[in-house]
């Protein structure tokens, strides 16, 4: 597989950290790329993936790549960057965050085609909701430049459009995390769901 990594490990305020081993991002696992038997065993038997969250559109002919008797496949077609503010895509983004709010779905792998733009947008929003600082959100976004999918820069117009879309939430400024939370709330994600996401994915830093 290409462009796959654990979403966790980033520091959070209060000597906390994004918990690892629960959310992974990647490219697609079928289509232009076919998952090997060894890769399938890694996902199922080592990472214990329970949910495959697929952002591909119908024109990409999405289908489950893992055994659906063991892994729940959820199709949630979205577009990246400033499309988060489009009314037509808000139901899909709402569904995405509701998936993260439900403990039975973990561990989760989410992906689009290359795992760069749509997956990068969701990674930015999810880690930002947890409290990851903007500098680390940018680093995670730009790590995709080390894959085969080309440079991803926070100076790109697409990334700036994402920040502009978050500005529409009314809280953009020095507090990017507040802007992201405001956006998530605009999707009608409840306090209980936000608390559930944070409870699942934020933990105290290990000691010793």
Image: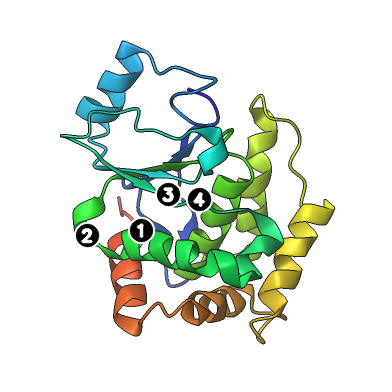
Q: In the image, what residue occupies the spot 30% across and 50% down?
A: 208
Residue name at image x 77 percent, y 46 percent: 153
Q: Nearer the viewer, mark 4 or mark 1?
A: 4
Crowd around label 4: few <14 · some 14–19 · many ≥20 (10 Å)? some
Left or right of residue 207, residue 162 in this image = right
Numbered disc in front, either 3 or 4? 4
Q: Which residue is mark 1?
A: 205
Q: Residues within 10 Å of mark 1 (few under 14, many from 20)?
A: some
Q: Which residue is mark 2?
A: 103
- The image position of residue 114, as x and y in percent, is 59, 33
Closest to the camera, between mark 1 and mark 3, is: 3
Q: Is residue 204 visible?
A: no
* Residue picked out by circle 3: 8
Label 3: state its secondary structure.
loop
Q: Residues within 10 Å of mark 3 (few under 14, many from 20)?
A: some
Q: Earlier in the sequence, mark 3 or mark 4?
A: 3
Q: Position of residue 104 (x, y in %)?
A: 19, 55
Which element is circle 2 on?
Answer: helix
Q: Left or right: 25 with respect to 169?
A: left
Q: Mark 1 or 3 closer to N-term?
A: 3
* Viewer-nearest residue: 178 or 67: 67
Please say if the residues under marks 3 and 4 sit with CB atoms less than 8 Å apart.
Answer: no
**Residue beneath label 4, please?**
77
Give how far apart the Cα atoms at labels 3 and 4 are: 24 Å
2 vs 3, front mark: 2
């Amino acid at each position: 597989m290409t462009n796959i990594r654990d979403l966790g490990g980033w520091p959070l305020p209060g000597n906390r950290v994004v918990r690892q081993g629960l959310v992974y991002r990647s490219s697609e696992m079928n289509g232009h790329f076919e998952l090997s038997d060894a890769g399938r065993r890694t996902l199922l038997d080592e990472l214990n993936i329970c949910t495959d969250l697929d952002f591909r559109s119908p024109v990409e002919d999405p289908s489950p790549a893992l055994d659906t008797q063991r892994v729940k496949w959820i199709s949630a077609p979205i577009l990246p960057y400033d499309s988060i503010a489009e009314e037509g895509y808000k139901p899909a983004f709402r569904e995405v965050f509701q998936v993260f709010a439900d403990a039975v779905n973990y561990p989760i792998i989410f992906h689009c085609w290359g795992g760069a733009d749509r997956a990068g947008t969701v990674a930015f929003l999810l880690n930002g909701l947890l409290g990851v600082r903007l500098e680390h959100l940018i680093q995670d976004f730009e790590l995709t430049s080390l894959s085969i999918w080309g440079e991803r820069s926070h100076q790109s117009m697409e990334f700036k459009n994402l920040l502009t879309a978050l500005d529409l939430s009314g809280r953009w400024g020095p507090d990017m995390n507040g802007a992201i939370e405001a956006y998530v709330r605009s999707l009608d994600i409840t306090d209980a769901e936000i608390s559930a996401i944070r409870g699942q994915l934020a933990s105290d830093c290990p000691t010793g």
